[in-house]
Image (tube, rainbow, N blue to C red):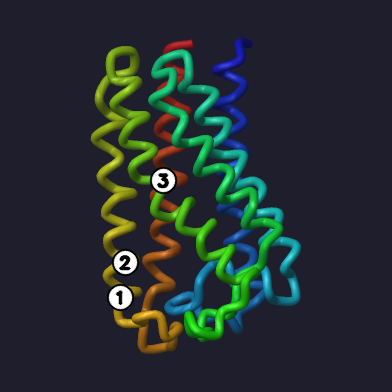
Amino acid sequence: MNVEAIAAITALIAGGVTAGLIAILHVLEPEYDPSWRMISEYSLGRFGWVMRLAFVTMAVTPAATCVALWPFGGAWTVGLAAVALGALAAAFIDTDPIMTSRAQATPVGRAHTLLGLVLLAGFPPAVLFAGIGVATELGWTLAIASVVPLAGLVWFLTAAAPAHGQGGSPAIRMGWPDRFCLLAYLAWVVLAAVSVLRVV
């Protein structure tokens, strides 16, 4: 088995573990209402270590996808590695509670927000570039599929806009689009990994 196939399988496994861990957290910590609480906040709860582990596997997913796609797209895929760094760093830097206003945010919370933006906002352009880069070898499916993560990001930004730096509340339903983004990102990884496994 070559490196691309191993990386593709690693991406699939890490993505599945990520989704499974976060699904389990919804059961373990029901006090975090998924309609308006961010996934990152699970790192503040009783089972914070589970969310930290999920961030690590979340980082492995795009990193392994970058390795799998590299022979087909080269530098076009490097954005996936940058996204992975954002997720990995977030595993060790906790967020502030969603109700925290921008003015009251801690330095650690600000750092987490910045890293979260690298992941959340960086993923759609990263997969678009990767999809374009591999199109000659793997077809245009991955580039076209990047529309779904982009739609998730637009939904999230639209839902979060009413916060205006004042922090979240039950009236600001940004939890669902946050979770949709994660699922859309993982679905794109599955598509990329399967595309690689078909040709190697």
Vertical comparison of 145 with 155: above or below: above
Q: Earlier in the sequence, mark 1 or mark 3?
A: 3
| Quarter holding residue 106 | bottom right
Q: Residue at x 46, y 22 (%)?
A: 69
Q: CA distance from mark 1 to mark 3?
A: 20 Å
Residue hosting label 1: 161
**Compared to 11, does 161 lie above or below?**
below
Distance Cα–Cα, label 3 vs label 2: 14 Å
Other-residue count near label 1 (Cα within 10 Å), few / some / many at <14 / 14–19 / ≥20 = few
Q: Residue at x 47, y 30 (%)?
A: 78
**Percent x, y for residue 14?**
61, 41
- Tell me the SS state at disc 1: helix
Dots 2, 1 in contact, CB < 8 A: yes
Q: Residue at x 53, y 35 (%)?
A: 81
**Rendered location of residue 193, percent (x, y):** 47, 28
Q: Is residue 63 above or below residue 138?
A: below
As drawn, the label of residue 157 is 2
Label 3 crowd bin: few (<14), some (14–19), many (20+), radius 10 Å: many
Seen from the viewer's position, the closer of residues 20 and 104 is 104
Residue 196 sits in quarter: top left
Residue 58's disc number: none
**Residue type, numbered disc 1:** Ala
Q: Is residue 121 left or right of residue 155?
A: right
Q: Which residue is mark 3?
A: 123
For badge 2, the amino acid type reads Leu
Q: CA distance from mark 2 to mark 1?
A: 6 Å
Write the residue at 66% across / 67% down: 94
Of label 3 and label 2, which has the lower sequence position?
Answer: 3
Q: Amino acid at mark 3?
A: Phe
**Relative to 195, is 20 on the left or the right?**
right
